[in-house]
């Protein structure tokens, strides 16, 4: 007679032996151990599994597919690295040795000056010509300061602004916006670290209803005067060929002004007007149109009734090798400030 009883299973371990087997099956793998030198004790090293090997929510059970875990699961150090500045972006220190970013004109871009000159500017007599200055003079001044460790530290702590991808140039106001971000931003950071006292940069600095300069630098808290001014122009208003035709290393005071009849006559008359006004009280006046930067310094003529003397340098701002604009502007401003402190930078007192 056959038995209906199920086959018996060999008895398993009992007591402590069964308990130890259950714990071994349910416990995670132990971390590797390392002996602490000289202590005789054992130090446990933490085991960290890569987040990329852990299945993300919604992908459990899927083989061969790995997804990036949510930010909440990433270690803090990885989050910090991902949220930092793009390593391809330049620091302000590096920007001093780079060309300015190229800009694009709007479809309805308009050539030439868009703002008529006032009566005061129209009645101003321009210089006979402009005498070239070596740009290396200003680059050397800038390099004296940019090579200092303290200045390097300040400028290396900030990133240069990236060009807005929607930015286009249509008129002079767009050049003013562009200059504030890409030309004077790094320069003003450097000035703040170099000069012995704080300064401020003002836009649309008005002496009267007849004269208003686009940008002026003056001591912080002052209510008038300045040590340098910058006039903006619409893109392509400053042509190299017009400046080349009006420069002269040995001008003759008896000849007519080389600026007469030239497209740049109006802008030269503007900066000449500014350096003659007591309100601005400076001989350092410059021009910028997005493509070129002209750094000018006016001097008194040998005779009181003669035209003022303009010395300057014209600096291209775009292109692979045209990386001098920010350094030249910095050197020019530092010199203007230092001469102001020595009483050598005041407006021209002419008849």
Image (cartoon, rainbow, N blue to C red):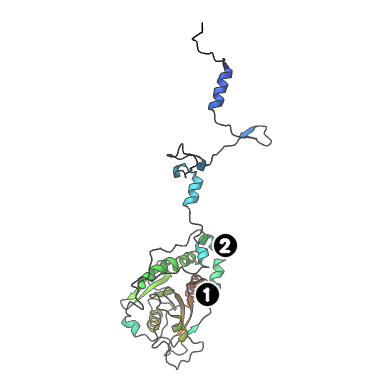
The answer to whether 26 appears left or right of 122 in the picture is: right
Of residue 17 and residue 283, the one placed in the foreground of this image is: 17
Find out whether the residues at labels 1 and 2 contact each other: C-beta distance under 8 Å.
Answer: no
Query: Hey, which quadrant is residue 172 in on the image?
Result: bottom left
Asked whether residue 145 is in view, the answer is: yes
Give the farthest residue toward the top: 1
Specify few, some or many for label 2: CA neighbours under 10 Å numbering under 14, 14-19, or 20 or more.
Answer: few
| Residue 324 on image: x %, y % | 51, 72
Q: Which mark is residue 66?
A: none
Q: Find disc 2 in the rendering and name its residue.
A: 149
Give the farthest residue toward the right: 38
Residue placed at 52% from the left, 41% from the top? 53
Label 1 vs 2, first from the N-terminus: 1
Helix, strand or loop at label 2? It is helix
Q: How many marks?
A: 2
Q: Is residue 51 above or below residue 347?
A: above
The answer to whether 57 appears left or right of 47 in the picture is: left
Residue placed at 42% from the left, 65% from the top? 181
Of residue 40 and residue 305, the one placed in the foreground of this image is: 40
| Residue 142 on image: x %, y % | 53, 70
Q: Find disc 1 in the rendering and name its residue.
A: 138
| Residue 134 on image: x %, y % | 53, 79
CA separation, marks 1 and 2? 20 Å
Helix, strand or loop at label 1? It is helix
Q: Is residue 239 above or below residue 157?
A: below
The answer to whether 117 appears left or right of 51 in the picture is: left
| Residue 168 on image: x %, y % | 38, 68
Query: Hey, which quadrant is residue 303 in on the image?
Result: bottom left
Specify few, some or many for label 1: CA neighbours under 10 Å numbering under 14, 14-19, or 20 or more.
Answer: many
Residue placed at 54% from the left, 62% from the top? 152
């Amino acid at each position: 007679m056959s038995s209906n009883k199920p086959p018996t299973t060999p008895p398993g371990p009992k007591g402590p032996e069964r308990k130890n087997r259950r714990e071994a099956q349910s416990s995670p793998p132990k971390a590797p151990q390392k002996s602490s030198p000289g202590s005789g004790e054992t130090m446990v090293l933490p085991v960290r599994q890569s987040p990329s090997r852990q299945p993300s929510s919604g992908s459990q059970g899927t083989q061969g597919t790995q997804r990036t875990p949510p930010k909440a699961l990433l270690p803090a150090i990885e989050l910090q690295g991902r949220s930092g500045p793009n390593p391809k972006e330049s620091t302000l220190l590096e920007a001093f040795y780079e060309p300015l970013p190229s800009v694009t004109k709007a479809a309805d871009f308009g050539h030439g000056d868009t703002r008529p000159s006032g009566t005061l500017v129209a009645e101003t007599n321009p210089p006979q010509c402009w005498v070239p200055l070596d740009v290396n003079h200003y680059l050397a001044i800038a390099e004296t300061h940019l090579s200092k460790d303290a200045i390097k530290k300040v400028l290396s702590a900030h990133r240069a602004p990236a060009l807005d991808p929607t930015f286009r140039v249509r008129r002079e106001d767009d050049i003013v916006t562009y200059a504030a971000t890409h030309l004077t931003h790094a320069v003003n950071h450097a000035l703040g670290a170099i000069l012995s006292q704080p300064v401020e940069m003002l836009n649309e600095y008005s002496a009267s209803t007849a004269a208003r300069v686009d940008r002026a630098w003056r001591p912080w808290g002052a209510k008038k005067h300045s040590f340098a001014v910058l006039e903006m122009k619409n893109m392509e208003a400053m042509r190299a060929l017009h400046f080349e035709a009006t420069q002269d290393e040995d001008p003759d005071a008896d000849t007519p002004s080389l600026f007469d009849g030239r497209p740049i006559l109006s802008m030269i008359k503007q900066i000449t007007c500014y350096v003659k006004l007591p309100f601005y009280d400076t001989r350092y006046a410059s021009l910028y149109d997005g493509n070129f930067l002209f750094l000018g310094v006016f001097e008194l003529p040998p005779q009181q009734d003669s035209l003022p003397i303009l010395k300057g340098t014209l600096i291209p701002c775009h292109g692979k090798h045209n990386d001098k604009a920010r350094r030249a502007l910095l050197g020019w401003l530092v010199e203007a400030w230092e001469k102001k402190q020595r009483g050598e930078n005041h407006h021209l007192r002419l008849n």
